[in-house]
Amino acid sequence: MKTAVFYLLTIVLVLWVQMAGDYFVGASGFSGNTVLVVVLYFGLSRGPMTGEMLGLLWGLLIDASSLGLLGLHALLYAGAGYLAGMLRRQLDEKKAWTQAIFSIGVSLLYVLVYFIADRIFSFGPHPVSWPMIAQPLINGAMAPLFFWFMQQWSQLWDMLPQER
Amino acid sequence: MDWELYEQQRATLVFIGVAFVCFLLLAFQRSSAVQHIKAFFVGCTFPTQRLFSQMTAASPAEKNVVSATPLVDSLVPSVGTVDMHAEQSRALRVLAEENARLNELLELKRDRWPRLISAHVVGRDPQKWFQEVLLDKGQEDGVHMEDPVIAMAGSREALVGRIVEAGTHSSRVMLIHDSLSSVAAVVSGSKGEDGVVEGSNSHDLYLRYLSRDSQVKIGDLVVTSGLGKMFPEGVPIGWVQEMGLDPRQLFLQARLRPAIVSHPLRLVGILVKHE
């Protein structure tokens, strides 16, 4: 029960942060991708299954809220969660540099696949929103903060990942 | 270690399934089944978006669009620094400005557009900022595909776009800034020259296909011409800001300053075509 409440609240909280960012600073184009960073945290700390399932759910909700193609963010976030989970044992997710560099790398991949998929599945041309290219750097900068926050949040609920 | 391997294999299988489902969703975007799924998730995120929309109802950026709260403004200095009073006065200002905007739309409904429905903008995608917005009114409120959308800009209305997707309780608007948008337009003040206003996925709009001996001047108002019956006649779109030849040097084109500033768009009116 506690686990379900923890995940439910986490989903709502992160979604709010992401939607607030989109709504209030989205006009500039220079907005971070909170959901992606948090998906990476869950993938790296809890494994691919948790990462991809949370990514799928957040992605569907973001697709619905952002008027985008339903399934696009879901696929990308699930993919990011899966990738992070598969690299779980190879990376030390507790180091801030690892968090930042890994977030930048995955974000670059994310932006690239996003624009390719948008062109394939979208109706009509949608040119690249150039400020979005800055998103990987923003994500990298905020990754240590969000990783720390999610760790504290997990600790608060006594839900830190168990080492096996 | 075995457990780790088992988890990875299981996760890989699940990811293949997830990817397959996502591809199906992407490939069948316009099918009714996917639209139903989308409507469910829109329903989940809608209250939050509505909340943000209300929170920013009186953002400073809107001050140029809405006048109208002298009474509340006069109260502000007297409340001093007391936080609670400041918050109350802010809430009052939000309500007063919301009321002023609704009144403007109501006047518009009474005077010019009897079938106007007011709607709040509740969602925008940062990656498609100049292309689409999400409204909190849908089919149940009488909204249909292709209905024109306007908003108040100062003392009169201005064209915002048209409905391209009408859900049960929400709808999607293609803004005139979208590069796929084209609006039959006429330049008022000159010899009534016709052209087509096209978006550029940016702040700028372009009035294209003006003849090379056009009399259009900088500062002329461009309004909808009503040709094609998509949009009603005489709705302001923008003012001519710059003139030049198009890339093929065949026609003149004008860069327009949009009548509606797309950033602080909060409350719009949908001109319902069908009862």
Image: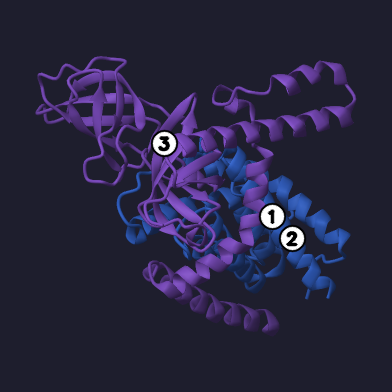
Question: Which residue occupies the foreground of this view, B105 or A60?
Answer: B105
* Spatial CA span between label 3 and label 2: 48 Å
* Marks 1 and 2 share the same chain: yes
Chain letter, colour blue in render: A
Q: Are marks 3 and 2 on the same chain?
A: no
Q: What element carries label 3?
A: loop
Q: Which chain carries label 1?
A: A
Q: From mark 3 to mark 1, how far is it between C-alphas?
A: 44 Å
Identity, as a three-letter code, of the amino acid under mark 3: Arg
Residue at the spot 87% in from the left edge and 59% down from the top edge: A156
Q: Report if the CB atoms under discs 1 and 2 are less than 8 Å apart.
A: yes
For the question of whether residue A162 can be seen, the reply is no
Amino acid on which disc 2 is placed: Thr
Q: Circle 2 sits on which residue?
A: A10
Label 3 neighbourhood size at 10 Å, few (<14), some (14-19), many (20+)? few
Which residue is label 1 attached to? Answer: A14
Residue B112: mark in rendering: 3
Do labels 3 and 2 touch, CB within 8 Å?
Answer: no
* Residue B213, position as x, y percentages in the image: 10, 18
Residue at image x 38%, y 67%?
B30
The quadrant in which residue A65 appears is: bottom right
Q: What is the three-letter code of the residue carrying label 1?
A: Val
Q: Which quadrant: the C terminus of chain B?
A: bottom left
Q: Residue A44's spot in the image, x, y percent?
A: 67, 63
- Foreground mark, 3 or 2, reads 3
Q: Chain B is drawn in which colour?
A: purple
Quarter the N terminus of chain B occupies: bottom right
